[in-house]
């Protein structure tokens, strides 16, 4: 039985958090046009695209270059380069310094997608109107401050920018897939178009975020009704097919393969030789990665500032990773315990009869593919944890909608865990960013104040 009160009003808090995202992305709000690590590689790629070329300047991509038949290529998804094209047209002096603007835009899409997804799901929950508002607002704040997106927005290097965009478009696609379930007429068609575009953009941002959405598109096609079927099929598949075709053709033009880059072209000999010998993805890594990303080992707490300190840690010698150190400075249970609890409850709902339908179950399975894929990757880093979140957030959303009175019983637990996660994740992220010598001084100074420490490089 649903509580009364309808959809919780999360817009005021969401707008306030948009200001916070700006502050996070710009290191206090006033450091906007700053050169991030290799950020101008996207500007270079954008210029090459406009000339009908798929290359990039070696000086822009440097240590992350792929050399294919003597030509310089980059393996990062092209979507951030597309963002640069209008920005450089409007303000040419900003060339090479758009990373923070790009990251802010991605963060806004992620924020509004999560806010609307939580609000629309809580509308059908068993919670009272007041509880929906409290839980919904807490979840949105938790997403920004109690998840890896805080780290990604705080460090918008080339490594993180594409991941932020991939996560943002993935969450947007899940939102429009959810809207499709209850839409009719034009609203249904618009939901399909929005889902298809979001999926295409996710694919072009980072393939691990886009691939499961292609599978989900096939599931949505099974739910399209007879009336106006042809137009709705076109709405669903034309933008997605265009994005997929562009992705495949771009890969072929860059690397001579539709599947994309292999590390045989990588300029870094350590990763190149390791990937050639052990593979980029290997299921044997999953247990090691899971134990690292979901470790229960706490960070280092102190009674004096900085109150919480994190660092890289050594991985077991038997672990088949390319580097002996893991850059997962804060595991998911400590970063986002609220997501873990909600996701576990959502998984229970998925396996219980009559709680969910086949589309939800297969959607979860598709997203779990992304989850398992990143666990099989040959490196461990905090930024890669973002690939775990579409699956975890989807399971959480399932629990919010199908949890019934179990949600009523754990609502205070969820809010409490969100508060704890925000404190731990904020302090840990601030310490890490303040200590990273690869970041601009503006970034280290800003986060050093939050962490309560002076900027010192991580060793």
Image: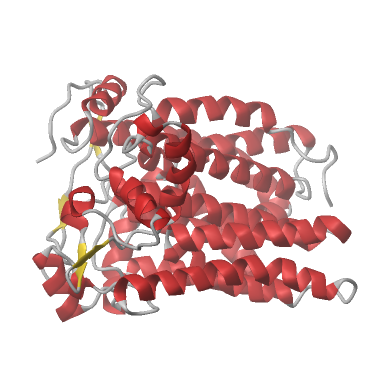
- What residue is shown at x 30% (from left), y 22% (from top)? 446
- The total number of labels drawn is 0
- What residue is shown at x 22% (from left), y 51% (from top)? 327
For this orientation, the residue located farthest to the right is 227
Residue 237: image location, x then y, percent? 67, 71
Residue 402 visible? The answer is no
Residue 363: image location, x then y, percent? 61, 69
47 displayed left or right of 171: left
353 displayed left or right of 242: right
For this orientation, the residue located farthest to the front is 51
- What residue is shown at x 37% (from left), y 76% (from top)? 252
Q: In the picture, which quadrant includes the C terminus?
A: top left
- What residue is shown at x 63% (from left), y 65% (from top)? 239
Q: Please determine whether, in this image, residue 425 is positioned above or below residue 26.
A: below
Q: Which quadrant holds residue 452?
A: top left
Task: Give the colour scheme of this rendering.
Answer: secondary structure
Q: Please determine whether, in this image, residue 237 is positioned above or below residue 449.
A: below
Residue 33: image location, x then y, percent? 35, 28
Give whichever of 331, 409 is nearer the camera.
Answer: 331
Residue 28: image location, x then y, percent? 38, 21
């Amino acid at each position: 039985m649903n509580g009364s009160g309808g959809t919780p009003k999360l817009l005021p808090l969401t707008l306030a958090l948009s200001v916070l995202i700006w502050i996070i992305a710009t290191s206090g709000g006033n450091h906007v046009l700053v050169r991030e690590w290799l950020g101008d590689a996207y500007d270079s790629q954008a210029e090459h695209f406009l000339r009908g070329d798929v290359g990039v300047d070696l000086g822009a991509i440097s240590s992350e270059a792929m050399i294919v038949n003597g030509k310089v290529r980059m393996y990062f998804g092209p979507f951030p380069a597309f963002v640069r094209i209008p920005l450089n047209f409007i303000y040419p002096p900003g060339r090479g310094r758009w990373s923070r603007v790009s990251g802010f835009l991605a963060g806004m899409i992620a924020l509004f997608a999560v806010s609307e997804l939580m609000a629309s799901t809580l509308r059908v929950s068993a919670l009272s109107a007041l509880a929906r508002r409290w839980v919904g607002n807490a979840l949105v704040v938790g997403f920004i401050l109690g998840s890896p997106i805080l780290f990604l927005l705080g460090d918008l290097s080339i490594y993180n920018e594409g991941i932020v965009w991939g996560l943002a478009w993935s969450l947007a696609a899940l939102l429009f897939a959810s809207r499709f379930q209850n839409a009719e007429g034009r609203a249904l068609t618009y939901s399909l178009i929005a889902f298809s575009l979001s999926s295409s953009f996710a694919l072009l941002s980072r393939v691990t975020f886009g691939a499961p959405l292609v599978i989900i598109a096939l599931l949505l096609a099974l739910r399209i009704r007879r009336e106006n079927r042809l137009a709705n099929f076109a709405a669903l598949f034309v933008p997605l097919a265009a994005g997929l075709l562009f992705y495949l053709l771009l890969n072929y033009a860059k690397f001579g393969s539709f599947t994309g880059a292999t590390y045989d072209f990588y300029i870094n000999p350590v990763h190149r030789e390791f990937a050639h010998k052990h593979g980029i993805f290997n299921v044997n890594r999953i247990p090691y990665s899971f134990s690292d990303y979901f470790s229960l080992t706490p960070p280092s707490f102190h009674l004096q500032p900085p109150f919480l300190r994190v660092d890289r840690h050594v991985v077991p010698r038997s672990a088949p990773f390319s580097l002996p150190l893991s850059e997962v400075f804060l595991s998911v249970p400590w970063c986002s315990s609220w997501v873990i609890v909600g996701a576990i409850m959502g998984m229970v709902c998925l396996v219980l009869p009559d709680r969910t339908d086949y589309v939800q179950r297969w959607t979860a399975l598709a997203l779990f593919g992304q989850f398992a894929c990143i666990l099989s990757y040959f490196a461990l880093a905090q930024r890669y944890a973002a690939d775990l979140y579409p699956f975890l957030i989807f399971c959480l959303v399932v629990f919010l909608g199908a949890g019934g009175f179990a949600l009523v019983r754990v609502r205070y637990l969820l809010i409490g865990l969100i508060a704890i996660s925000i404190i731990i994740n904020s302090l840990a992220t601030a310490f890490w960013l303040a200590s990273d010598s690869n970041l601009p001084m503006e970034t280290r100074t800003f986060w050093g104040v939050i962490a309560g420490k002076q900027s010192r490089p991580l060793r």
